[in-house]
Image: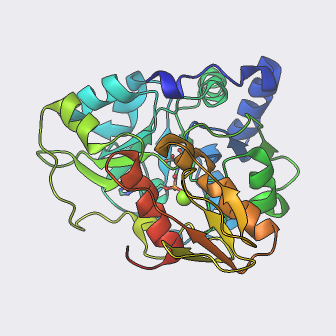
């Protein structure tokens, strides 16, 4: 998993800054922090008042469950019970990394984390600052950091600290913090895998693909149904202000995101030209944001074809456009 390996951004934040941030969490404050996928808005996952502030700042309905971030597989049993063997295999292979496991909850995972469901989502992020924060928080007795993406409800997840400030800065209070770890390397949210059945089931596609899951577990994935709620799968989500139109020819003055091999028609504003799916995922949200910053009314996106990460990119694009492709 060298693509997501934690190491790059430690220089942006001293250990002192991380221990101060851990204290903020311990005192019930909020800390926005980088992960390899997108930036998260963190709170002490055992503190009801702190977690309630996440919902206020995001403007998010309170029955939407949150992911608990932990520093290693060792902490999984604190938050989950009856963990199947295939989930342990996944955790060993892909943590730290862009993967969230949904498991039956322990008593510690209260309704204010799980949205009242009997399951909890848990993830070990692969980012030096996130892991550093989790370690400092553990030193203070912290057991996990609840963190949704650090955007207002329904908007695009932030992939830079600047985007976090633009999204939620005005809703944070003076005790809260935003840690800057540079741009997120993966760029789309973690793969969410329901591990409560006999076989794993993908609830949200991401950088950990179905092939990787099959290779790790040796078990065929079960088809998605909707027995479990994953509100990130609301139809309209991940939306910029501009109208997103998929796989069309852009007109004069419109924004354009397309693979590098496609040329920009005259009078069209090119926002990104990714050469690979990895680059597409990494640059997509910042490109959509830059379209909004330019005040564009329409952004045309040519969706990548194929399997793997392309599935996650098409999933987010479909929701941004709120239309099937
Ligand atoms: O990459 C990520 O996962 C980022 C970073 C910050 O870790 N986090 C993230 O969180 O995307 P959020 O809250 O924006 O999206 C998490 C999704 C939501 O759609 C939520 O409904 C789903 O995970 N989820 C969380 N716990 C769940 C559970 N117990 N059962 C089903 N879905 C769950
Ligand atoms: Mg989100």
Q: Which residue is drawn at 74% across and 53% down?
A: 164
Determine which quarter of the picture holds residue 117: bottom left
Whether residue 324 sits left or right of residue 157 in the image: it is: left
- 134 vs 208: above or below: above
The answer to whether residue 281 is seen in the rendering is: yes
Decide which of 283, 153 is in the foreground and name it: 283
The answer to whether residue 13 is seen in the rendering is: no
Q: Position of residue 239 (x, y in %)?
A: 59, 71
Q: Where is residue 47 in the image (x, y as percent from the top left)?
A: 59, 47
Whether residue 180 sits left or right of residue 152 in the image: it is: right
Decide which of 256, 41 is in the foreground and name it: 256
Q: Where is residue 95 in the image (x, y as percent from the top left)?
A: 41, 27
- Report the quarter where the N terminus lies: top left
Determine which quarter of the picture holds residue 75: top left
Which residue lies most toward the right here? Answer: 174
Q: Where is residue 254 in the image (x, y as percent from the top left)?
A: 70, 76
Whether residue 4 sits left or right of residue 172 in the image: it is: left
Q: Residue at x 43, y 75 (%)?
A: 235
Decide which of 22, 151 is in the foreground and name it: 151
- Report the quarter where the C terminus lies: bottom left
- 305 vs 97: above or below: below
Q: Residue at x 59, y 26 (%)?
A: 131
Q: Which residue is drawn at 33% across and 66% down?
A: 229
């Amino acid at each position: 998993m060298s693509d997501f390996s934690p190491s790059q951004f430690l220089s942006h934040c001293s250990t002192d800054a991380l221990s101060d941030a851990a204290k903020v969490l311990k005192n019930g404050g909020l800390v926005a922090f980088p992960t390899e996928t997108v930036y998260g808005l963190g709170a002490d996952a055992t503190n009801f008042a702190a977690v309630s502030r996440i919902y206020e700042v995001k403007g998010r309905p309170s029955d939407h469950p949150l992911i608990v971030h932990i520093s290693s597989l060792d902490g999984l049993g604190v938050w989950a019970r009856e963990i199947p063997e295939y989930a342990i295999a996944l955790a060993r292979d892909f943590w730290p990394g862009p993967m969230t496991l949904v498991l039956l909850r322990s008593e510690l995972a209260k309704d204010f984390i799980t949205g009242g469901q009997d399951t909890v989502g848990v993830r070990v992020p692969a980012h030096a600052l996130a892991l550093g924060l989790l370690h400092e928080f553990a030193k203070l007795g912290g057991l996990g950091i609840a963190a949704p993406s650090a955007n207002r409800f329904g908007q695009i997840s932030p992939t830079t600290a600047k985007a976090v400030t633009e999204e939620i800065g005005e809703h944070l209070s003076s005790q809260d913090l935003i840690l800057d770890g540079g741009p997120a390397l993966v760029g789309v949210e973690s793969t969410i895998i329901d591990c409560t059945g006999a076989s794993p089931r993908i609830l949200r596609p991401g950088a950990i693909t179905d092939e990787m899951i099959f290779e790790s577990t040796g078990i065929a994935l079960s088809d998605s149904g909707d027995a479990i709620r994953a509100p990130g799968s609301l139809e309209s989500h991940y939306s910029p202000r501009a109208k997103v139109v998929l796989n069309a020819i852009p007109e004069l003055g419109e924004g354009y995101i397309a693979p590098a091999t496609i040329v920009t028609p005259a009078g069209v504003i090119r926002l990104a030209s990714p050469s690979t799916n990895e680059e597409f995922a990494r640059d997509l949200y910042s490109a959509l944001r830059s379209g909004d910053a330019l005040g564009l009314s329409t952004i045309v996106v040519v969706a990548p074809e194929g399997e793997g990460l392309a599935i996650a990119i098409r999933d987010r694009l479909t929701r941004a456009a709120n239309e099937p492709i």
